[in-house]
């Protein structure tokens, strides 16, 4: 029954969170700040992972088709499909759950145990809307840009390493990334990304907002936020794939 308690309390928190902001100017200022914290400060790690993953997929695929029975352009096709369908829209959000989710949970959890949230409530401020809504909107806005960048960098890294390692000519690689391309796959990836962005921020904020105790409990809330976010991402990934691609 504990799971139903948390589900009900989560939706009650979201209902409070999505009330109309009292001061739009303040809301937009907070949202811009969160875009920087959630998205801009994550560009480095996303770029690094995407570059190396694209290069590794290229080399691994090339190593598997040395027999000559499979055309070389398969390397470019595999890198494109892997980056667009799974690595960029799913694995990057999983990593972001660890980086961004733990930070959100610890930040809000610290505010809870130091009674800053209670002070906001006493002053008549919608603390959930003030603390959580700008983060959710910022994540939903900036995550798709991070994922598009990840796709581009991964495919580009595959082309570069394929040429430098002399495993596939650039012309064949270009044929592969253009072969049987379906633009809906990009839309599918961005839909997943938007849903995952909401899951990461809302679940992390929920655990932080309802933290009780002291510093030890803040750490526990951060861990729970990451674990539950990743589990929900995986379950939602399966459901969205079933709904959108089959």
Image (tube, rainbow, N blue to C red):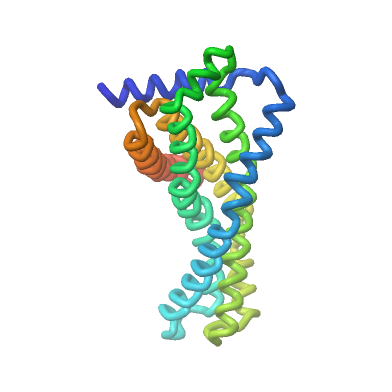
The structure residue drawn at horizontal position 42% and vertical position 24%, both measured from the top left corner, is: 10
Residue 95 placement (x, y as % from top left) = 46, 52
Residue at the far bottom in the pictured view: 166
Residue 205 placement (x, y as % from top left) = 47, 32
Residue at the far right in the pictured view: 25
Q: Is residue 143 visible?
A: no
The structure residue drawn at horizontal position 47% and vertical position 49%, both measured from the top left corner, is: 99
Image quadrant where residue 182 sits = bottom right
Residue at the far front in the pictured view: 114
Relative depth, front residue between 222 and 195? 222
Q: Is residue 111 above or below residue 61?
A: above
Relative depth, front residue between 190 and 102? 102
Residue 218 placement (x, y as % from top left) = 38, 36
Relative depth, front residue between 71 and 91? 91
27 relative position to 1: left or right:
right
Image quadrant where residue 131 sits = top right
Quadrant containing the N terminus is top left
Residue 125 placement (x, y as % from top left) = 59, 16
Q: Is residue 245 visible?
A: yes
Q: Is residue 117 above or below residue 28?
A: above
The structure residue drawn at horizontal position 59% and vertical position 63%, both measured from the top left corner, is: 180
The structure residue drawn at horizontal position 61% and vertical position 79%, both measured from the top left corner, is: 172
Q: Is residue 209 above or below residue 240?
A: above
């Amino acid at each position: 029954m504990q799971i139903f308690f948390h589900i009900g309390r989560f939706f009650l928190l979201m209902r409070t969170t999505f009330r109309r902001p009292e001061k739009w100017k303040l809301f937009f200022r907070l949202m811009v700040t969160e875009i920087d914290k959630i998205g801009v400060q994550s560009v480095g790690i996303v770029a690094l992972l995407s570059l190396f993953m694209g290069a590794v997929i290229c080399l691994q695929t090339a190593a598997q088709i040395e027999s000559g029975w499979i055309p070389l352009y398969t390397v470019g096709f595999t890198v494109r499909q892997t980056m667009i369908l799974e690595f960029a829209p799913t694995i990057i959000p999983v990593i972001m759950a660890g980086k961004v989710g733990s930070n959100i949970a610890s930040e809000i959890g610290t505010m809870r145990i130091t009674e800053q949230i209670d002070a906001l409530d006493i002053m008549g401020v919608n603390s959930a809307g003030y603390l959580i809504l700008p983060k959710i909107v910022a994540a939903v806005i900036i995550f798709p840009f991070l994922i598009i960048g990840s796709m581009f960098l991964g495919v580009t890294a595959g082309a570069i390493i394929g040429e430098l390692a002399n495993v596939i000519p650039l012309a064949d690689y270009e044929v592969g990334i253009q072969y049987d391309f379906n633009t809906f796959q990009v839309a599918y990836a961005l839909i997943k990304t938007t849903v995952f962005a909401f899951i990461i921020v809302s679940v992390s904020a929920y655990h932080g907002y309802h933290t009780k105790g002291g510093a030890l409990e803040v750490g526990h809330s951060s861990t729970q936020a990451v674990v539950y976010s990743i589990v929900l991402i995986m379950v939602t990934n399966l459901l969205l794939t079933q709904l959108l691609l089959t």
